Amino acid sequence: MILRRLLWVFAMLALTACSSSSSKVGAQPTLLSEFKQTASFAVRWHAQLGGADNYLLRPAIGKTMIVGASSKGLLTALERANGKQLWQVNTGIVVSGGVGGDGSVWVVGGDKGDVLAYDTTGKPLWKVKVSSEVLSVPQVADGVVVVRSGDGRIAGLAVADGKRLWSYDRATPALVVRSFASVTIQRGIVYAGFAAGKIVALDIKNGSLIWENAVSQPRGNTELDRISDITSNAVVDDEQTCAIAFQGRVACFDSAQGSPLWNRDISSDKGMMLLRKYLYLTDAKGVVMVLDKTTGSTLWKNEQLMLRDTTAPYSFADFVVVGDFEGYLHAMNREDGHFVARIKLDGSPVAGAPLELDEGLLVQTHDGGLYSLTLH
């Protein structure tokens, strides 16, 4: 029942977003325009993991291997350097969240709440169950596997045996957006955003609350209008923690105390990247923009990917890279946002932001294509 309500709200929000945008940019995704390429992508290797179905699956990177998963339950380890398959196991579950890991243990979650851990040879270590389906990547740090389930609960499990160490739960509104948001861990603190625009910082050792604040406040006359959920990961550095809400705001806080620094009315369900002086984000309509992390002021924005289901951006070398629903990767100049390179992968959507790999990028498509690329 809960899943049906979440899926319904997700669909309604998508229709609402398209409808509200149609008067400005048309109901169709923006067509790609030609440009002079001054940089280029190149594929170093390509492997096939299997499709993601209705989930957002991500690869995990270790020192010598990369581990990815398909929704049908296959967990595959590949050589980091060339993509050659090292091992493959059938988890026996529908994988709906993953892959997470710290280089010595690999963790996936399932649609029935199962959480499974494997060692670097593919040997099963343990299997436990959390309160509901796992829709996001389990995170591993400081001997703890932090798992977020679809009902918003967060569990801390022991890496060694999966034993429950702690759990964190909070009340949720009647209607929420189906979210693939995980948690962000830094310096022993777990940062997580929730429905109704709240963000919390928890101690990874025991799950105790360190601080809580509001990114966005629900507003509007109907329950649908009042949805203001944080549906992407918080971004954190030593100074600031920032999060963004759908139909809400982006806000930054002091990482240690949680005191507010600034906020702006920007809506996003895609996510952000925080790097040095800049906050990179893609808004709900697909506009890619860069903000000054200190003030929140806009430095540049690129509106040429509107309604293309543009991913969160990844800042790499002199570029900002995003993917879209047709399987394209787009590279923009980091200084002003103009396009410099483009490549089409297998034609299925790129749903997650690229990851950095060996002076290049790693991208998983919806149909399970895993690509290691260079960009120069």
Image (cartoon, helix red, strand yellow):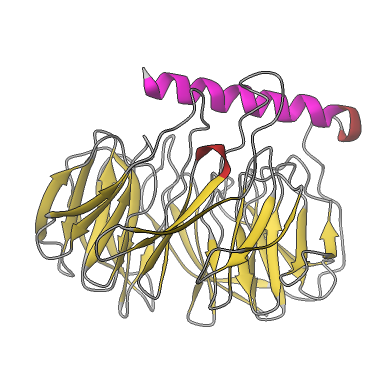
Taking the image as drawn, is residue 68 in sight?
A: no
Q: Position of residue 10 (x, y in %)?
A: 55, 28
Horizontally, residue 142 falls left or right of residue 234, namely: left
Magenta-drawn stretch contains 19: yes
Which residue is depicted at the point 64% across and 44% down?
216
Count of all numbered marks drawn on residues in the image: 0
Q: Where is residue 355 in the image (x, y as percent from the top left)?
A: 51, 67
Left or right: 255 with respect to 148? Answer: right
Q: Position of residue 149 (x, y in %)?
A: 33, 41
**Residue at 48% in and 39% down:** 179
The quadrant in which the N terminus is found is top left
Q: Is the magenta stretch mostly helix, strand or loop?
A: helix
Horizontal side, residue 159 vs residue 265: left or right: left
290 left or right of 315?
A: right
Is 66 in front, or is 25? 25
Q: Residue at x 41, y 34 (%)?
A: 171
Q: Is 9 a magenta residue?
A: yes
Furthest residue to the right?
A: 24
Q: Measured from the top left, where is residue 42 in percent x and y?
A: 60, 72
> Front-most of 208 and 22?
208
Question: Does any portion of residue 283 appear in the rendered image?
Answer: yes
Q: In this view, does 189 lie above or below 137?
A: below
Between 241 and 181, the one nearer to me in the picture? 241
The magenta segment? 2-22
From this view, report whether residue 173 is shown above or below residue 373: above
Q: Residue 58 occupies which quadrant of the picture?
A: bottom left
The C terminus - image quarter: bottom right
